[in-house]
Image: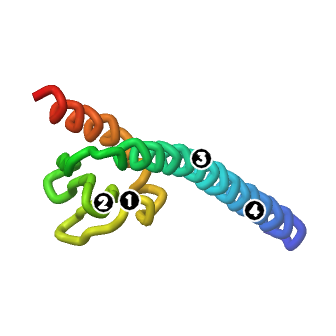
Amino acid sequence: MNVMSRAIVQKDELNQELNELFDLKKAKARKEKMLDQQSNEALREIRHLMLMFRDGIPNVTIPVSENETLEWKSDSQQLVYIKDRHVQVVEGTTKETMVNLRPFLIQIVKKAKEFYRH
């Protein structure tokens, strides 16, 4: 291979690597934007639930997984996430955790409704 054809191959490889880099960068930015949107929506729902629960809802606990729990604490009026005995206010969890807990908000409301039905 002569010098000229080697330079062309290297230029093509460089362009391909640069394109892949910017594709990865764009994909990561899209993923982060989507996570931001989802976590903002989850946070709005969490705050709404907490506001409504402050009106006298008793303690409510639901399992999220084998080692995770979501709990409304009526005395401190906080929604907490418990994982492996580590307690954290839900509003202070990571974006990923808030998004993952979102489906369980409905369950905690349903469990609170059971209290008033009995």
SS at mark 3 in the image: helix
- Could you give the CA–CA distance between mark 4 and mark 1, rounded to whole angstroms? 40 Å
SS at mark 2 in the image: strand
Pointer 2: what residue?
80
- Could you give the CA–CA distance between mark 1 and mark 3, rounded to whole angstroms? 17 Å
Q: Which residue appears at 85% of the width and 69% of the height?
A: 7
Would you place residue 110 above or below residue 89 in this image?
Answer: above
Q: Disc 3 marks which amino acid?
A: Gln
Which numbered circle lies on residue 52?
Answer: none
The C terminus is located in which quarter? top left
Would you place residue 105 above or below residue 24 in this image?
Answer: above
Expressed as whole percent of the image width and height from the top left, the position of residue 37 reads 59, 46
Q: Nearer the viewer, residue 17 or 93?
A: 93
**Pointer 4 and pointer 1: residues touching (CB < 8 Å)?**
no
Pointer 3: what residue?
37
**Pointer 1 and pointer 3: residues touching (CB < 8 Å)?**
no
Expressed as whole percent of the image width and height from the top left, the position of residue 78 reads 34, 59
Q: Which residue appears at 89% of the width and 68% of the height?
A: 4
Q: Disc 1 marks which amino acid?
A: Val
Q: Of marks 4 and 3, which one's residue comes earlier in the chain? A: 4
Q: Disc 4 marks which amino acid?
A: Leu
The N terminus is located in which quarter? bottom right
Pointer 4: what residue?
18
